[in-house]
Amino acid sequence: AQSVTQLGSHVSVSEGALVLLRCNYSSSVPPYLFWYVQYPNQGLQLLLKYTTGATLVKGINGFEAEFKKSETSFHLTKPSAHMSDAAEYFCAVSDNSGGSNYKLTFGKGTLLTVNP
Amino acid sequence: SQTIHQWPATLVQPVGSPLSLECTVEGTSNPNLYWYRQAAGRGLQLLFYSVGIGQISSEVPQNLSASRPQDRQFILSSKKLLLSDSGFYLCAWSATSRKLFFGSGTQLSVL
């Protein structure tokens, strides 16, 4: 069984400051890992994903995440926060055990607020 | 390009009334389809998924059901809504990339 823990349901940063959203996962097989962003009253958009290969993954809007197997982590970072980054962020894990059904297990989300 | 349509955007229903939420996907064939529910403070919970017409898997026991009458149509239903059914419902599809594409969601309030 897979699970995702997002540390901190709410993170507040100043505009221009570093954004760090934490995600730890549990998986019995090598995982696929994802970060999604959700703006108010909208669906989720994919920011980035890790499948195999390079452990540092770059996504849209200047975000990146690093897969650290030893720490079972996939933290999301952005060097300089922008007001438009204010949204809820979800980390998700999917197993890569094969088959055609790609079920994702999501964390509970982290609400990011950006202060001017 | 592929698009996903989900409606209605908002819905207010009395307890005990029926429910039907519809989701359609365009621009792809034989997608995997999913219904998620997002309750406040609880993240996203997978309710149902489907890998083909008429093939529905339920992830959690509940008051809801799902159907897939056509390849690109996925319907979430209930015969009698409960207060606990309130939430934000998201339809999603995936192909081979393991990437989920989400609809814009339906905010359901059961009163």
Image: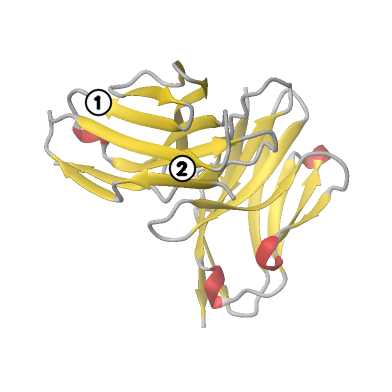
Q: Which residue is mark 2?
A: B43
Is B24 on the left or on the right of B111, as rendered? right
Q: Which residue is mark 1?
A: B78
Identify the residue shown where x is 65% and y is 76%. Answer: A17
Is A100 on the left or on the right of B11, as rendered? right
Q: Secondary structure at mark 1?
A: strand
> Badge 1, how many Cα within 10 Å: few under 14, some, many 20+?
some
Q: Position of residue B9 (x, y in %)?
A: 30, 51
**Picture quadrant of residue B38:** top left
Identify the amino acid type marked 1. Ser
Identify the amino acid type marked 2. Gly
Residue found at the very far bottom of the displayed protein: A116
> Label 1 to label 2, Cα distance in Å?
22 Å
Q: Position of residue A7 (x, y in %)?
A: 58, 49
Identify the residue shown where x is 26% and y is 33%. Answer: B20
* Residue A35, above or below B52: below
Identify the residue shown where x is 49% and y is 53%. Answer: A9
Chain ID, mark 2 = B
Q: Which mark is residue B26?
A: none
The figure's colour scheme reads secondary structure
Q: Secondary structure at mark 2?
A: loop
For the residue pair B26 and B13, the one nearer the viewer reads as: B26
Depth-wise, is mark 1 or mark 2 nearer the camera?
1
